[in-house]
Image (cartoon, rainbow, N blue to C red):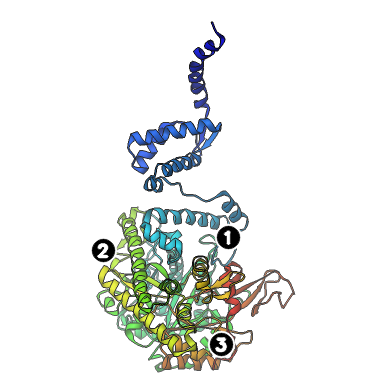
């Protein structure tokens, strides 16, 4: 017989034998750390289950993958590689929706290696440990999940391209923040779902503070942003009656140090916490019966505990002024002092104002909130109308911010090509996009909340005394305009403070956004509110994307250094940081814009190395309250922290003035909080260099 024919006779059986022998030897590493033999049927099952393909098409793709693997000669596979190969085939077949559903979420090896060895997170106050890097990696995966699964394609595209920024998108399964009174804890104590330990209501102030800190630490795991406590000093007042000044100071130290100590509680991040503080009992508490030790209602109202609340307030500020063990300002909890029309009626207000002025000029950290009406007093804290509080007990006063979405305002003008009518039409469309982003996350969160105390949001879904912890009718959605000044600059050639035309246009834009927020609230039966963005990275990201997509059209609008790429937009609706405008004039101009109901919006006064006279700040606060419409005022000194000798020095220095070490870090006001400048992006560092600093407040 011919030798070539003999080879043909045995060729096919040999191929079959080779397949039977070699395919079982092809191993696949699975994501659950198991190793299995390569089985093409598993590809079919996954495509049917995850992507919704019919069996015939799934089998065809599986066969193509099998042939590709065989041709490649690879002897060891991973499930992630197989999934990538399948996704490539889905693209070749034009099955984009199936590819999205079948996608694998993950982080490139290079990024993981860089993060583990150089652990730093945007906005972090210190380097991250292993727990922190785990958090960052988890957020990266959840960010991909949100873009692919939670948000629709138009919203995901708007976020990715920079029309909007969905803030905290890596925390897609968490609301942003919660504001509430102490009365929930005083009534229910530490009573957590899913069988966690419980305790009885506190009867002593130090126990109440321990409950407060533990509850905040637990709640932090369910929120993307800060935990906010309303009128903390009045909430504690019934517990501190009869205590001496020394005992009050010790209690204040206990409170502040307990909140600031767990710096590694969430992956190296400080516990983000804000404290609303009052000199006078706020309107929503003053006439209510106070809740005292043991969760019992007392015969006296909160306003009748004003003396105790004021004494504890002074003790708190004295501790803030002293700083931590090294004299460094406390980064958290952030105090917010509310100034009302009745502020000067209570004896001792001058001493408190002097103390607050000293704290603000020496340490920063303090925000002055101006409550000129009772309605604004409540709305500025809770984001809902004062009349809502009339139908609730004090322990039920609790609102939630579901999410914050930032708007890229300058881009609106770039696209409009100078057409003013088109500008306002585009602003309306941008607000619609932001509202839709909110609604899509809200639907997602409501599904998680519907799982109740056995679901992933157990703590905020729990019910006590027949009332849910989170009431959906007390939720708010923040829409955060960014870069108003740069939008006006592109339109008029001037910054807001440089011409009447520029200021008038800025007011028209903000008024339009305010009216759109009201319209969208009525349309969707969901509360949309304008607010200042607290995200440090947004101004740089928007500017960087606009430089890429709009080039020369946008170049003249940026702040910073265009040549080096260190560019940014103004954080919110305020004047640019470099504007050499005196403090009162800045508050006056920005107040005209803040008067359109912009929540969490503060006029920031950056201080030079020389500390101003605190008497000047007291006068500035009075003038800003009575003669402007500014919502909040922040006085922001800056500091250098030496990593060698651990001294904290006023001002920003390249070397430590004490030991001459170049191992230093800066501590400065980022957005609404202090943070270390080593964690700032290039745009934020450019803003830091540009800031107009002053030692004169009048």
Left/right placement of residue 134 relative to residue 188 reads right
Of residue 226 and residue 575, the one placed in the foreground of this image is 575
Give the label on residue 697, or none. Answer: none
Name the residue that disc number 1 marks: 128
Local SS, label 1: loop
Element at label 2: loop
Q: Distance between the Cα atoms at labels 1 and 3?
A: 37 Å
- Is residue 181 left or right of 581 when viewed as pictured? left
How far is disc 2 from disc 3 in space, using C-alphas?
Answer: 55 Å
Tell me the quarter of the picture where residue 661 sits: bottom right
Q: Earlier in the sequence, mark 2 or mark 3?
A: 2
Q: 556 or 229, which lies in front?
A: 556
Q: Tell me residue 64's x, y (percent).
A: 44, 34
The residue furthest right is 660
> 177 or 298: which is nearer to us?
177
Q: Is residue 337 left or right of residue 75?
A: left
């Amino acid at each position: 017989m011919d030798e070539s024919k003999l080879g043909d006779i045995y060729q096919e059986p040999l191929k079959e034998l080779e397949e039977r022998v070699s395919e079982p030897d092809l191993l696949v590493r699975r994501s659950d750390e198991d190793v299995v033999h390569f089985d093409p049927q598993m590809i079919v099952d996954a495509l049917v289950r995850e992507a919704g393909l019919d069996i015939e098409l799934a089998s065809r793709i599986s066969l193509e993958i099998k042939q590709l693997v065989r041709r490649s000669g690879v002897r060891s596979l991973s499930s992630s590689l197989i999934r990538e190969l399948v996704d490539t085939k889905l693209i070749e077949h034009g099955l984009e929706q199936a590819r999205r559903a079948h996608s694998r979420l993950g982080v490139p090896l290079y990024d993981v290696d860089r993060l583990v060895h150089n652990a730093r997170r945007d906005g972090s106050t210190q380097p991250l440990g292993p727990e922190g890097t785990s958090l960052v990696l988890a957020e990266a995966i959840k960010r991909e999940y949100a873009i692919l699964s939670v948000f629709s394609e138009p919203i995901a595209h708007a976020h990715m391209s920079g029309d909007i920024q969905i803030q905290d998108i890596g925390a897609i399964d968490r609301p942003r923040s919660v504001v509430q009174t102490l009365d929930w804890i005083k009534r229910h104590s530490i009573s957590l779902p899913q069988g966690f330990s419980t305790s009885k209501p506190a009867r002593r102030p130090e126990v109440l503070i321990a409950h407060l800190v533990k509850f905040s630490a637990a709640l932090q795991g369910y929120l993307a942003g800060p935990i906010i406590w309303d009128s903390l000093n009045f909430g504690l007042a019934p517990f501190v009656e009869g205590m001496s000044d020394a005992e009050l100071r010790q209690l204040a130290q206990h409170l502040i140090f307990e909140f600031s100590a767990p710096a590694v509680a969430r992956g190296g991040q400080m516990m983000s916490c804000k404290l609303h503080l009052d000199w006078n009992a706020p309107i929503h508490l003053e006439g209510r019966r106070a809740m005292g030790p043991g969760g019992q209602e007392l015969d006296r109202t909160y306003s009748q505990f004003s003396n105790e609340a004021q004494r504890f307030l002074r003790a708190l500020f004295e501790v803030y002024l002293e700083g931590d063990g090294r004299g460094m300002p406390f980064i958290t909890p952030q105090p917010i002092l509310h100034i009302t029309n009745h502020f000067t009626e209570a004896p001792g207000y001058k001493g408190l104002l002097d103390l607050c002025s000293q704290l603000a000029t020496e340490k920063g950290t303090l925000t002055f909130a101006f409550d000129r009406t009772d309605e604004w007093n409540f709305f500025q804290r809770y984001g809902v109308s004062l009349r809502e509080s009339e139908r609730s007990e004090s322990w039920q006063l609790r609102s939630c911010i579901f999410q914050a979405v930032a708007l890229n305002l300058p881009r609106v003008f770039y696209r409009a090509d100078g057409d003013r009518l088109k500008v306002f039409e585009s602003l309306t469309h941008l607000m619609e996009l932001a509202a839709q982003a909110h609604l899509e996350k809200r639907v997602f969160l409501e599904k998680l909340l519907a799982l109740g105390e056995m679901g992933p949001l157990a703590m905020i879904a729990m019910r006590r005394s027949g009332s849910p912890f989170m009431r959906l009718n007390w939720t708010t959605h923040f829409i955060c305009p960014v870069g108003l000044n740069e939008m006006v600059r592109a339109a008029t050639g001037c910054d807001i403070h440089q011409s009447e035309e520029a200021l008038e246009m800025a007011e028209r834009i903000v008024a339009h956004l305010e009216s759109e927020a009201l319209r969208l609230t009525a349309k969707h039966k969901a509360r949309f509110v304008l607010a200042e963005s607290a995200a440090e990275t947004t101004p740089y990201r928007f500017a960087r994307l606009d430089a890429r997509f709009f080039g020369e059209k946008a170049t003249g609008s940026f702040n910073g250094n265009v040549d080096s790429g260190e560019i940014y937009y103004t954080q919110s609706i305020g004047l640019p940081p470099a504007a050499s405008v005196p403090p009162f004039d800045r508050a006056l101009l920005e107040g005209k814009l803040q008067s359109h109901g912009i929540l969490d919006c503060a006029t920031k006064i950056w201080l030079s190395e020389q500390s101003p006279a605190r008497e000047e700040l007291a006068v500035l606060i009075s003038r800003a309250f009575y003669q402007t419409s500014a919502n909040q005022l922040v006085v922001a000194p800056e500091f250098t922290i030496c990593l060698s000798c651990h001294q904290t020095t006023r001002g920003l220095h390249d070397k430590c003035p004490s030991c001459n070490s170049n191992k230093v870090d800066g501590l400065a006001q980022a957005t609404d909080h202090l943070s270390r400048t080593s964690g700032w992006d290039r745009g934020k560092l450019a803003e830091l260099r540009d800031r107009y600093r002053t030692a004169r407040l009048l």
